[in-house]
Image (tube, rainbow, N blue to C red):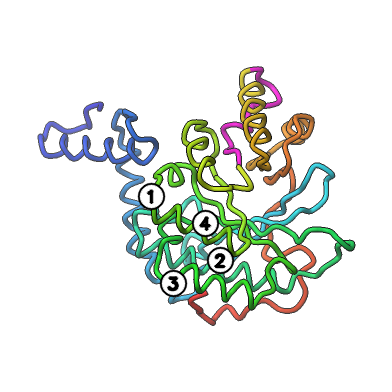
C-alpha cells in the first residue's frame, strides 16, 4: 500500500482497507498499492448502491441485445444485456453498475428481471430458420446467488414453458468462472436442475484451467466464453495467440463450444475464425440494439414491473 496524502493514522488504515477490498474483488490473494482512484471508485459504487434499489421500482432498466455470430457468419443468437437508464448519467452499461453477487438483495432482482424480460422477448422471435435448424441462442448473465434463490428453478420452469423455449429460443445462463469455482453443493444442485430443464450453461471469463477443469468434472457446461484479455492481441502477439489456442483446445477436447467476447477488430475476428472458435460477439460483430433481430410484435410495456 502506498501512503495517501495524509499523516492521520485513521486515514492510513482506511486506505489499507480500501486497497485490500479492491484486491479481493479483482482476484483472491492479489496485492495492490492504494491510490486515490480506488477511493473515488468505491465512493461511486456506494452511491450507485444507494440508487440501485429504485431501479426496478422506477422502471429504469432497459434491455439491449448484442448479436452472436457463428463460424459461417450467420446469426446464432444474442446476448441480452440489462442497461441502467440513469436520469442523470444516461445509458449505463451493466459492467458499470451491476452489484457484486455478494450484494444479494440488489443483484438477484436485476438478474431475475433480465432473464424474464429476455425470455418474453425471445418468445416473439421471428423464425426465419430452415427446417431442422436449432433454436437461436439467448445468452443471459446471472449471478450464482440468483440460481440458488428459493423458487428460482420452479419459476424459471414455468417461464420457459410459457415462452416456448427450445422451439422459439434456447436459454443459456452465463455464470462467472470465479463463482463456478466455489464448488458449493447448492449451486451444483441448481446446475443439475437447469440442465434437466434444457437450459444451457456457460462459464464466463474463462481462463483459469484448474477451476474450469474441476467444474467440468461435475457439471455439463455447454459453452465457455473467453474474456477480453484472451481476445486482445490474439492477432498480433504469439504469446496471446498460443494462450488462446490452448484454451480452445482444452474446451474442444471436452466437447464444449467456445465463445469469444469483446471482439473489436476484423483482424481479431479473422484470427479467431481461423483458430476454429465457435461463436463471436463484440463491436466487430455488431452493436447492441434495443430490439432482437427479426423480432415481431411489440415490446413489453416499459411501465409494467414483473417478478419475471
Mark 4 and mark 3: Cα distance apart in space: 15 Å
Sequence-first disc among 1 and 2: 2
The residue carrying pointer 4 sits among few (fewer than 14), some (14 to 19) or many (20 or more) residues within 10 Å by Cα, namely some
The image quadrant of residue 277 is top right
Q: CA distance from mark 4 to mark 1?
A: 13 Å
Place of residue 32 in the rendered image (x, y in percent of width and height, measured from the top left): 32, 29
Q: Nearer the viewer, residue 255 or 111?
A: 255
Q: Which residue matches tag 4? A: 192
Residue 274 at x, y = what percent?
Answer: 79, 30
Q: Magenta residues?
A: 225-238
Q: Which residue is mark 2?
A: 115
Q: Earlier in the sequence, mark 3 or mark 2?
A: 2
- How far is the residue under mark 3 from the one under mark 2? 14 Å
Label 1 to label 2, Cα distance in Å? 22 Å
- Find residue 31 and report its horizontal and vertical position in percent: 31, 28
Dot 3 and dot 2 residues touching (CB under 8 Å): no
Q: Is residue 155 magenta?
A: no
Amino acid at each position: 500500500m502506498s501512503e495517501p496524502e495524509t499523516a492521520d493514522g485513521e486515514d492510513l488504515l482506511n486506505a489499507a482497507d480500501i486497497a485490500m477490498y479492491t484486491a479481493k474483488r479483482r482476484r483472491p490473494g492479489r496485492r495492490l498499492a492504494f491510490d486515490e482512484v480506488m477511493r473515488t471508485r468505491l465512493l461511486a459504487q456506494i452511491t450507485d448502491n444507494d440508487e440501485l434499489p429504485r431501479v426496478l421500482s422506477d422502471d429504469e432498466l432497459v434491455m439491449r441485445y448484442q448479436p452472436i455470430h457463428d463460424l459461417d457468419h450467420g446469426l446464432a443468437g444474442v446476448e441480452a444485456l440489462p442497461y441502467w437508464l440513469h436520469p442523470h448519467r444516461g445509458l449505463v452499461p451493466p459492467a458499470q453498475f451491476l452489484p457484486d453477487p455478494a450484494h444479494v438483495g440488489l443483484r438477484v432482482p436485476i438478474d431475475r428481471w433480465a432473464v424474464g424480460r429476455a425470455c418474453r422477448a425471445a418468445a416473439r422471435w421471428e423464425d426465419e430458420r430452415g427446417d431442422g435448424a436449432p433454436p437461436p441462442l439467448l445468452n443471459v448473465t446471472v449471478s450464482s446467488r440468483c440460481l440458488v434463490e428459493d423458487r428460482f428453478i420452479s419459476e424459471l420452469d414455468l417461464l420457459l414453458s410459457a415462452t416456448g423455449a427450445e422451439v422459439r429460443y434456447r436459454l443459456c445462463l452465463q455464470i462467472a468462472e470465479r463463482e463456478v469455482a466455489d464448488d458449493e453443493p447448492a449451486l451444483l444442485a441448481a446446475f443439475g436442475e437447469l440442465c434437466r430443464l434444457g437450459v444451457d450453461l456457460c462459464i464466463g471469463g474463462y481462463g483459469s484451467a484448474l477451476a474450469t477443469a474441476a467444474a467440468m468434472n461435475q457439471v455439463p457446461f455447454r459453452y465457455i466464453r473467453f474474456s477480453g484479455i484472451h481476445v486482445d492481441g490474439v492477432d498480433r502477439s504469439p504469446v496471446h495467440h498460443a494462450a488462446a489456442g490452448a484454451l480452445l483446445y482444452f474446451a474442444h477436447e471436452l466437447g464444449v463450444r467456445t465463445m469469444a467476447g469483446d471482439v473489436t477488430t476484423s483482424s481479431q475476428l479473422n484470427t479467431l475464425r481461423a483458430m476454429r472458435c465457435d461463436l463471436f460477439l463484440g463491436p466487430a460483430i455488431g452493436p447492441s440494439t434495443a430490439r432482437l433481430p427479426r423480432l415481431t410484435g411489440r415490446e413489453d410495456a416499459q411501465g409494467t414491473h414483473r417478478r419475471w
